[in-house]
Image: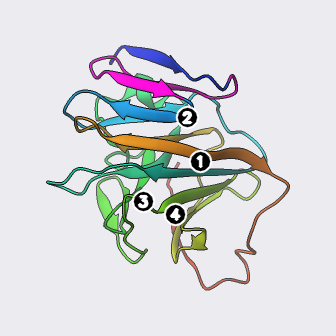
Amino acid sequence: MPKLFVVEDEDPEISFKTMNDLRVICKKREFLWKDEGSSTICVNKVLKEGVWLAEVVFLSRNPKTGKGAIGICKKGWLESHKTTFMGNDPDSIDYNANGELFYKSDSYPGNEQWAFSNIIGAEINMENKTVAFFVNRVLQQHAFSNIPDEVQFGVCGGFTDAGVRLVTFKQLPGPSFDDSQSSMTFHKWNK
């Protein structure tokens, strides 16, 4: 299993975990990967109840592959998986820059592609077990239902000098949309 270290931010409510084979610098909710290679950083807070909003802005993205992603994983995913990018196993999903969601390495296309300067968001609803994604605060078509009872928000990146800013990480008073009234497509996460 990978060894992890905690990256403490100046904001006492935010700390992240990442794999210790990649150096990550953190200051004022900005994270900078200092080594080549994909890696995921996860918020330490485990989401168990309520509705949560996480938003990031990628300050740069890999010019060769365009990679960069946000997503969620089961509690403890970093400690138990050797893969470094979410979405390649049954315990995590991600939303890539090309607009695709990934789960178990299967692709679910149809969401908007995003640029490194866009605000990329995830609304994680632990009450009805869904996660939906946003680009510049516009709700995207494809989402996931049946998410695990305990999840963590994560960001994938990891090429040299990749940067990401955590814009928002907070609990909401309720969902921002009614998923029973929307025309969204929900893909099922198999627990």
Q: CA distance from mark 4 to mark 2?
A: 31 Å
* Quadrant of the snapshot with the N terminus: top left
Q: Which mark is residue 117?
A: 3
| Other residues around mark 3 within 10 Å, as few (<14) / some (14–19) / many (≥20) | some
**Along the polypeptide, which appears first: circle 2 or circle 3?**
2
Label 4 crowd bin: few (<14), some (14–19), many (20+), radius 10 Å: few
Q: At numbered mark 4, what does the secondary structure look like: helix, strand or loop?
A: strand
Q: Badge 2 is on which residue?
A: 29
**Closest to the observer, 30 or 65:** 30
The three-letter amino acid code for the residue at tag 3 is Ser
The x and y percentages for residue 141 are 52, 78
Q: Residue at x 52, y 50 (%)?
A: 56
How many marks the image carries: the answer is: 4
Cα distance between the residues tagged 3 and 1: 12 Å
Cβ atoms under marks 1 and 4 closer than 8 Å: no
Residue 103 location, x and y as percent? Answer: 38, 55
Report if residue 96 lies within the magenta region.
no
